Structure formats: structure tokens, C-alpha cells
Amino acid sequence: MITKRIIPCLDVRNGKVVKGVNFEGVRDIADPVEMAKFYNESGADELVFYDITASVEERALFSDILVDVASQIFIPLTVGGGINTLDDFDRVLKCGADKVSVNSGAIRNPDIIEQAAKKYGDQCVVLSMDIKRVDGEFKLFSKGGRENTGIDALQWAVDGVNRGAGELVVNSIDTDGVKNGFDLELLDEIAARVDVPIIASGGAGKMEDFAELFKHPGIDAGLAASIFHFKEIDIKDLKKYLRTQGVEVRL
Amino acid sequence: MIAVIDYGVGNLFSLTASLKYLGAETVVTNKKEDIVAADRIILPGVGAFEDAIAKLRATGLVETIIEETQKGKPLLGICLGMQLLFEKSYEYGEHEGLGLIRGEIASIAEDLNDKTLKVPHIGWNSLSFDADEPLFKYINQGDYVYYVHSFYGRDCLENTIATSNYDITVTGAVRNGSVYGTQFHPEKSGNVGLNILKAFIEL
């Protein structure tokens, strides 16, 4: 049967991998190409690269890095960050991305989901969402989690899938960086509403958090950054542990 | 030299990069002379069957491809490229394929018993294969390969050389003489996939 996926996420700024806590306090860690190789050998099932740069020069550097990674690492690569137009999809796909993750760009222009799905196929379009509880309701945030759009996040997920998103990344701002487990309440709500693969993000702190996550039906993958980057959890060890817990993983 | 057929379907970055990584000389081409001159052929493909078979036929290369495989030149169809090798497909209608592999392409969703399973069948699944197939000489039974597809090959038992389980038996790879096909993406299946491509290069 199909396996549950473990996905390290690499935020890249100015040619380096970074990771903030609650999206703030960004700091440098490592060379993205070396890190991608390390994760490939550790058994990562996919890699996600987020371009968190702003300037045109840095964007060109990111494209170069992507080409380097995709020429040496032959597992699925998802790329996000600064995806606003079909030209952006085209740019990263030509650099070796397999899937493209769209977030704020889809909030500004939801039609981009449909256009990209028609042009590249549903499987290519990943809708990434930053979600936070506001007055007891799940709200969609934009701009890296800084701005409340006021949009109902659960409805946004459903609309995104109807428009053609082939996969959802559900990032809980409430649990992100806290390392006390994934936001299972939020994930259950979304899994009950859509039938595309769901990638859970935000909150993983220990191996048990992943075992708990995969007990929930409809969750296909767990994504994390700092716990993998700082080697607090080794992906190979994590997968061995998950297998003892009855979770099917690729080893 | 490997001729990767360019007929305007799908992203060839990973495929050409993985062949280069393995040290294979590759030409991405829609020219008959390149296909005749090459010592093996790869037919890639992502998208919908009807559109892809029309684009492939429009290149005028189908006859050449079939002739070359009849001479024993190895051909590898990948994903939709594998599906095009079949006799016909029921993806949105009924469409005729190249007929190099006996069987048909049908909807996974319609054939699933467990309707809670997600379609597309996307992700890593373990592969069971015929141990004496040279394509798999560098990999182990149960190794994982990466799939992304909503339609699959069926009624193709005599040409099936590998399968995966997704409630139904998913045809993972097929072979008829020198014609090979994989439903999964070897160019996205990590070291296992590279080892399958390496074996193809050595056929």
C-alpha cells in the first residue's frame, strides 16, 4: 500500500536554509544542496523548498539552487514562495520542481489555482494555507502568517480543492514552532471536508507526534523543518519507529 | 545514445537530469533520424491520454518507433508514456493506443472497492516484480517507487512484470519483447529509480 510521507521543508533566503520560530527570528543553517542530499540519504520522501526572498537577484539565486538540487536528487520536489502567476509556475517547473505550492498568490487571485491545474494537472498544484484560531474560528492568514484575511479557512480549503488543488499543506500557526504536536483538531476538520492528500505542518516536536498524526485518517504526510535541520529527529529513526507503531513508511 | 521523445507533453527536466547523472548520453528529440540512430528510446508523458496520443501521432514518429522496437531496440514508456503503449484507454471516452502492450487503461476510482482511498494514487508504493526481469536486476522485492496517476493498466497479465497494491492490483511495469513500460516514475523514485534506469541503459 501507499506509504505515509515524511517531508522536510527548507526555507531558503539568500542561498541559505533558514527556519524561524512562529515565523520570526529567522537564522541561517546550511547549504540547501548539501541539506537536500543529506535528506535524500536519510529517507525523506519529498522535499519542499520555500523561497522566502524578496529581491529579483535572490530569486535568480534560488532558481540556480533549485536546478542544482533537481540535477542531483531524484525524489519529488515541491517549490513555493512568491508564486503569483502562471509564469511563476513555469519558472520553477523548468528548474526541476514537480509540484508548485501557492499560498498568498492564491488569496490575491484564486483563479491561479484553476489556471495552473488546467495547464499542468491537479497533481502539480499544492495549496498551502497558514491557519490560526481567531475567536474560536479557523481563519486564513496571508503574508507568511502575519495578516488575517478574515477568510474562513475550512471553506477556503474546500474551495481550493474544487478549483483544482491536488494537495493541501495545512500549516497551523497556533502550533508552529511550539513542538507540542500537530494541530489535530484543525487537520480533522479539513480531512472531513476534502478528498485530496493532506500534508500536516506545524508543531512536530518528537517522534510520537508523527505516530499520533498518522492515526488520524485522511492525513497523508507530515512536514517539519527545524527538528530535522537541527537533527533533533533523524528521519531514518523516525521511520523505523513509525513502522513499529504500525504506520506504513518507506524504508 | 538514448532518444527521449519530445512531443510536447510533460516536464522532461528530471528524466534528462537522471539519465545525465547516470552518465548516459541523451538526446531530446522529435526527429526520425535521431530515433533510428539511438540505441534505446524513452517515451515520457504526463497529462491526459487523448491529448497525448494525438500529439504523439502528430509528430509522425509512431511508425518509426514501432519499427525500431520490432528490430529489438529497447523502448521504455514512463507513466502516461507507458499507457500509450497499450491497445486502448477509457480515459474520458475510448481511445486507441499504440497496441505494443496487450491490455487497456481504465479508471482507478471506478475499480476501487474501498471508495475512501484517494485518487490520484500518489506517493511511494512497494513493488513486487518478476525476479528474472533484467530491468529489476539492481533492486530488491518490496522496494518503493513513486506513483502519480488516476488511470492504470488492466487485463494485461501476460505483459505485466511488476505490480503494486492499492486495494486493486496496480500494474507497475509491463514488457513485451523489447518494449518496456513503468507506471511509476523511475526518475522520481530516488536510488531505486536510478537503479531501474541504470538497468534499462544496460539492456
Image (spheres, grey):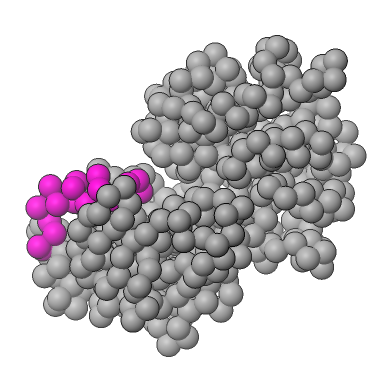
- Which residue does the image show at 44% across and 27% down from the upper left? A114
- Which residue does the image show at 43% across and 69% down from the upper left? B171
Main secondary structure along the magenta-highlighted residues:
helix
- Which residue does the image show at 68% across and 12% down from the upper left? A149
B179 on left or right of A168:
left
- Measured as percent of width and height from the top left, residue A66 is found at 51, 39
- Measured as percent of width and height from the top left, residue B40 is found at 24, 68
Q: Does residue A221 show up magenta in the picture?
A: no
Q: Does residue B57 show up magenta in the picture?
A: yes
Q: Picture quarter containing residue A247? A: bottom right
Of A224 and A222, nearer the camera is: A222
Compared to residue B97, the image places residue B8 above or below, namely above
Q: Picture quarter containing residue B183? A: bottom left
A85 on left or right of B60:
right
Regarding residue B103, the answer to whether it shows in the image is yes
- Measured as percent of width and height from the top left, residue B34 is found at 14, 58
Q: Give the residues in magenta.
A: B44-64
Compared to residue B64, the image places residue A45 above or below, namely above
In this view, the residue farthest toward the bottom is B132
